């Protein structure tokens, strides 16, 4: 049972990071624009920081998928899960800070191509996989590689993908359409 749960957690984290990376690659101006709107880093650093964040997300996602798929072992997998957990915790803390500092103003999160405002749901989208990554790191040895059991690996991968997609779309799904119309936003 624990193998399945840890595998689902690792799959969820890997896919969340992969989705984030792909979203940033598909809309390369979104994150730098959001960082500029946040006014938390000097304007000259917004593009390099956005590029570094996108690269880190991609590297961690590919590293996690590779480590699980090849059965790389507890050491590498634990390190990747801890790194992902730290990155996602930083995202959760950062978005929480933005949410508190916005005082009701609409602030873009920069997480994706969608013009999603920072909300408690955005914080949750980062916090949940952060907790999953750190919890899975504790029992990384329990994750089933495809060579050990293709069926268990497939089950964990599919469940992880479902949870990742649900978490990813959660902030957009929770936007009140009436509030969006009142603010003049369309297509949400």
Image: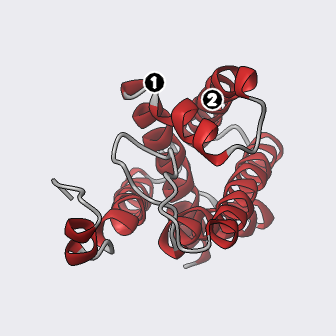
* Left or right: 73 as drawn, with respect to 185: right
Quarter location, residue 139: bottom right
Which of these two is toward me, 42 or 82? 42
For label 1, the SS is loop
Snapshot colouring? secondary structure
- Can residue 81 be seen at all in this image of the molecule? yes
* Left or right: 28 as drawn, with respect to 39: left
Dividing the image into 4 quarters, which one contains the N terminus? bottom right
Mark 2 is surrounded, within 10 Å at the Cα level, by few (under 14), some (14 to 19) or many (20 or more) other residues, namely many
Dividing the image into 4 quarters, which one contains the C terminus? bottom left
Give the residue at x 72% y 57%: 94
Q: Position of residue 56 (x, y in %)?
A: 67, 31
Q: Is residue 30 above or below residue 129?
A: above
Which of these two is toward me, 78 or 99? 99
Mark 1–mark 2 contact, CB under 8 Å? yes
- Can residue 166 be seen at all in this image of the molecule? no
Q: Is residue 50 above or below residue 168?
A: above
Most extreme residue toward the left is 187
Give the residue at x 62% y 36%: 36
**Which numbered tag is attached to residue 50?**
2
Give the residue at x 72% y 65%: 97
For label 2, the SS is helix
Q: Position of residue 138 (x, y in %)?
A: 80, 66
Q: Tag 2 or tag 1, which sits nearer the N-term?
A: 1
**Which numbered tag is attached to residue 144?**
none
Residue linked to disc 1:
28
Quarter location, residue 40: top right
Q: Is residue 5 above or below residue 17?
A: below
């Amino acid at each position: 049972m624990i193998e399945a749960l840890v595998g689902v957690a690792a799959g969820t984290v890997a896919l969340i990071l992969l989705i984030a990376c792909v979203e940033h690659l598909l809309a390369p101006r979104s994150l730098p624009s959001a960082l500029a709107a946040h006014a938390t880093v000097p304007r000259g650093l917004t593009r390099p920081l956005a590029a570094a964040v996108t690269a880190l997300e991609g590297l961690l996602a590919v590293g996690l998928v590779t480590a699980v798929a090849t059965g790389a072992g507890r050491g590498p997998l634990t390190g990747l899960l801890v790194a992902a957990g730290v990155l996602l915790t930083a995202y959760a803390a950062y978005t929480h800070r933005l949410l508190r500092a916005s005082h009701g103003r609409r602030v873009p999160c920069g997480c994706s191509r969608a013009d999603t405002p920072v909300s408690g749901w955005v914080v949750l989208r980062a916090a949940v996989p952060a907790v999953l990554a750190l919890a899975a790191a504790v029992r990384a040895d329990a994750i089933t590689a495809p060579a050990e059991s293709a069926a268990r690996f497939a089950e964990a991968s599919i469940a992880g993908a479902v949870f990742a997609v649900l978490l990813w779309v959660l902030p957009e799904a929770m936007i009140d359409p009436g509030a969006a119309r009142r603010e003049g936003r369309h297509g949400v």
